[in-house]
């Protein structure tokens, strides 16, 4: 395994000084994920150790789509379980620090499948790994994690949430009569 290589190295457009003050540690920007349309993903080094910083797009906030506090709670709750999850380093809900709330986690090794057709021998391992990860997620006792899991009506809640997000998205008009 190796780190995902889908990285665009950018001139540092992420101001690390406020992050360094927040963490009391040295931060270096390595690059930014070149794909994705939800939260912005930055690959950073904290005192030379690979990490990931994620924040919502500046100027756009879809409350449930960009809920990094919720994501942070899940990362912490799944730590120590069979689910392969990054380690939580920090969560900052103060938008004054970098202009938006952000979360920092360890950087995990893995395979990026975006635009890549993996070699035939790798496909079986990738499929098994995906199935094992899904099984691990489903084996977690949500009550032991103290994570919120409202009972029933999941699909109705999702559809309502997606409609609300679509109504808040400035580019939704290009989707026509979705």
Image (tube, rainbow, N blue to C red):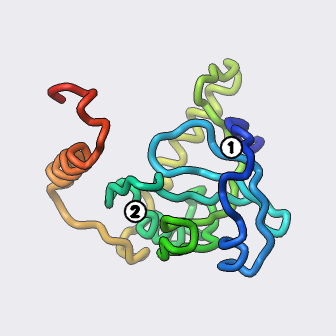
- Rendered-image quadrant of the N terminus: top right
Q: Where is residue 56 in the image (x, y as percent from the top left)?
A: 47, 56
Q: Is mark 1 on a helix, strand or loop?
A: loop
In the rendered image, the residue lying farthest to the right is: 48
Task: Give the answer, above or below, for where 46 lies relative to 133.
Answer: below
Q: Mark 2 points at which residue?
A: 67
Task: Give the answer, above or below, for where 68 lies relative to 6.
Answer: below
Dot 2, crowdedness within 10 Å: few (<14), some or many (≥20)?
Answer: some
Q: Where is residue 70 in the image (x, y as percent from the top left)?
A: 41, 67
- Residue beneath the point at 49% across and 51% down: 39
Dot 1, crowdedness within 10 Å: few (<14), some or many (≥20)?
Answer: few
- Residue beneath the point at 35% across and 74% down: 143
Task: Give the answer, above or below, for where 172 lies relative to 59.
Answer: above
Contact, mark 1 vs mark 2 (Cβ under 8 Å): no
Using residue 160 as the reference point, say whether residue 23 is left or right of it: right
Mark identifier at residue 110: 1
Q: Position of residue 22 (x, y in %)?
A: 65, 79
- Rendered-image quadrant of the C terminus: top left
Using residue 83 as the reference point, say whether residue 57 is left or right of it: left
Q: Is mark 2 on a helix, strand or loop?
A: loop
- Residue beneath the point at 40% across and 62% down: 67
Using residue 12 as the reference point, say whether residue 35 is left or right of it: left
Q: Position of residue 26 (x, y in %)?
A: 80, 71
Label 1 to label 2: alpha-carbon separation: 24 Å
- Residue beneath the point at 56% across and 58% down: 54
């Amino acid at each position: 395994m190796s780190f995902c290589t889908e990285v665009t190295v950018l001139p540092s457009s992420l101001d690390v000084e406020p992050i360094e003050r927040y963490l009391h540690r040295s931060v270096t920007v390595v690059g930014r994920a070149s794909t994705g349309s939800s939260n912005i993903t930055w690959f950073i080094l904290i005192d030379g150790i690979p990490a990931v910083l994620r924040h919502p797009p500046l100027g756009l906030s879809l409350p449930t789509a960009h809920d990094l506090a919720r994501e942070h709670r899940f990362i912490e709750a799944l730590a120590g379980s069979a689910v392969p999850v990054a380690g939580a380093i920090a969560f900052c809900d103060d938008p004054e620090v970098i202009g938006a709330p952000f979360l920092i986690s360890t950087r995990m090794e893995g395979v990026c499948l975006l635009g890549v057709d993996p070699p035939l021998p790798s496909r079986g391992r990738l499929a098994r790994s995906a199935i094992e990860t899904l099984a691990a997620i489903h084996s977690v006792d949500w009550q032991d994690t103290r994570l919120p899991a409202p009972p029933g009506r999941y699909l109705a809640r999702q559809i309502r949430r997606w409609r609300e997000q679509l109504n808040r998205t400035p580019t939704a008009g290009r989707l026509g009569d979705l």
